[in-house]
Amino acid sequence: MSENLYCDTRGCCQQAVPFTQAVINGLAEGGGLYVPEHIPTLTLDEICELAHMPYAKRALFIYQVFGVDLPDEQIDLLMQKSYGNNFDTEAICPITSLDAQTHVLELWHGPTSAFKDMALQCLPHFFSASAAKLREEGKLEHEFLILVATSGDTGKAALEGFCDVDGISIGVMYPHGGVSDIQYKQMATQKGENVCVWSVEGNFDDCQTGAKNVFGDTEYAQVLSERFNTSLSSANSINWGRLMPQIVYYISAYSQLVAEGKLEAGALLDICVPTGNFGNILAAYYAKRMGVPIGMLFCASNENRVLTDFINTGTYDISDREFVLTPSPSMDILVSSNLERQLFELTGRNTTSIAQWMNDLKQNKSFRIDPETFACVREHFSADSVDNDTCLKTIKDVFDEHNYLVDPHTAVALHVAQSLRGENPVLIASTAHWAKFGNNVYRALHDIEPSQPLPEDVASLSGCQLNELIAQETGMCNIPAGLAELDELPIRFTEIISNNVSSIEEAVSTFLDDQQD
Ligand SMILES: *Cc1c(COP(=O)(O)O)cnc(C)c1O
């Protein structure tokens, strides 16, 4: 396959770079995001053929057509590591059909039971391989510390993905008292020699600001380089290496539906995605561009409905918007970083417009797209939002009607799919196992309002015990092992640190010191 290079959305990079360099750089020079110069296309036959190979081979094929600059045998090996028995099903992301026209793509069969595993079981291997390649070519000397601030889900998925990967350490910070019992135990019990977890005083914002300040401290970067031969990286969702694994599952899902006789080859499929940073739905758009017969993309928001309003009005405005806490916390986002890539594609790759809008957003906390681009948005996307009450009611309704239990993020998408769907069958991206959000699933099943406390006897249960109770009540006994065993695992990380830069830096240095011993 011919090599593909990566340019940036704001037209600031002098030179396009290969995949490996884009993965290591993360963010492009000038603040833009990396995008492939060339979007490959597939024939319908090629797409349908994929269902007849194991998932790892499908991923290999897609990486090859994207011209990833690593040897085929190496990509093959890395994909087998990424999508093997670390998932609890050979299908990796199986599809459950609620009826002939409603198909749920279960993206939560990985080790942490959330869809971020689909990307974060894969990216770390490619990050490590990319770094090794650049070292060989003399373009890189140091090692990496991945520093992540998390509100819950991403931190655990990143820990699990980078755990024991060569040449990389990972440190995760979460807000002290600000994550659920399950999320806390998932992180605090993390195995691996190259991992560290800190509970940070303050809320998630304090945590994130703390991390940003560490990234911005050039003096500390010098210390890391001289003392530890290390530099910081975030491997966050703007990294192209996190997006590409997500394109794979949409192409794969289409192929699977055809192979299972649920869809005629060539028939249009609409896709509904519960959206936060716009990464997951952007991946579906790229699958469409690559030739998968996809009709409309439904963008599902919770009460933080900035994306829904944008898709319905053409104006992205966070100047007067309050951040709301919802039962679907992984979609509680105001600045959707991957929207930049989407607009780049919809403007016909107009870097001037993108740079302008992103600057407007920074300066005025809003931007408005031109009428032609807005027409393009409307051609591919429609959007709706779901309030907290409706989210929980949907969990109950879907359970009563289909005997299928969904998490609050998936519920948002299911409800939006019902309100926006037309004639085409719909594929719903299901992004978490219900047992990651047992509190709100319990509320839903017992008609307790989203903001109301749980009854005392229920509130006193651990996350695992609550899940067992729900499993007994519903007969849904398929709680993933990684969640069911949490009460039994030893807590490894108990350190609480302050959110100022020097405390975080001291914690990082101590961690790296211990690693060198
Ligand atoms: C991260 C996340 C989302 C949002 O995905 P984006 O790619 O940010 O749009 C939705 N659901 C769950 C469970 C998530 O963890």
Image (tube, rainbow, N blue to C red):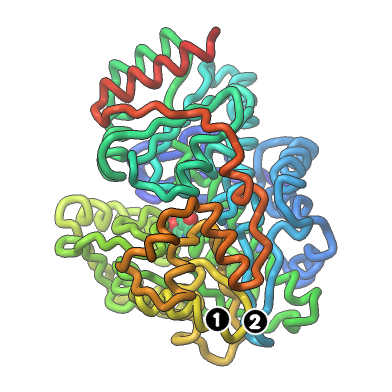
Q: Callout 2, which amino acid?
A: Leu
Contact (Cβ within 8 Å) of mark 2 with mark 1: yes
**Residue 319 point in image, percent of width and height:** 16, 61
Q: Is residue 290 above or below residue 19?
A: below
Q: Callout 1, which amino acid?
A: Val
- Ligand 1 within 8 A of label 2's CB? no
The residue located at (60%, 20%) in the rendering is 135
- Ligand 1 within 8 A of label 1's CB? no
Asked which quadrant contains residue 349, the reply is bottom left
Can residue 349 be seen from the camera position used here? no
- In this view, the residue in front, 41 or 387, is 387
The residue located at (61%, 60%) in the rendering is 107
- Residue 98's tag is 2
Relative side of 246 to 495, left or right: right
Which residue is label 1 attached to? 398
**Residue 375 point in image, percent of width and height:** 37, 78
Determine the secondary structure under disc 2.
strand
Asked which quadrant contains residue 249, the reply is bottom right
Q: Name the quadrant of the C terminus.
A: top right
Q: Is residue 304 above or below residue 495?
A: below
Query: Which numbered disc, 2 or 1, marks the residue closer to the eye?
Result: 1
The residue located at (69%, 36%) in the rendering is 70
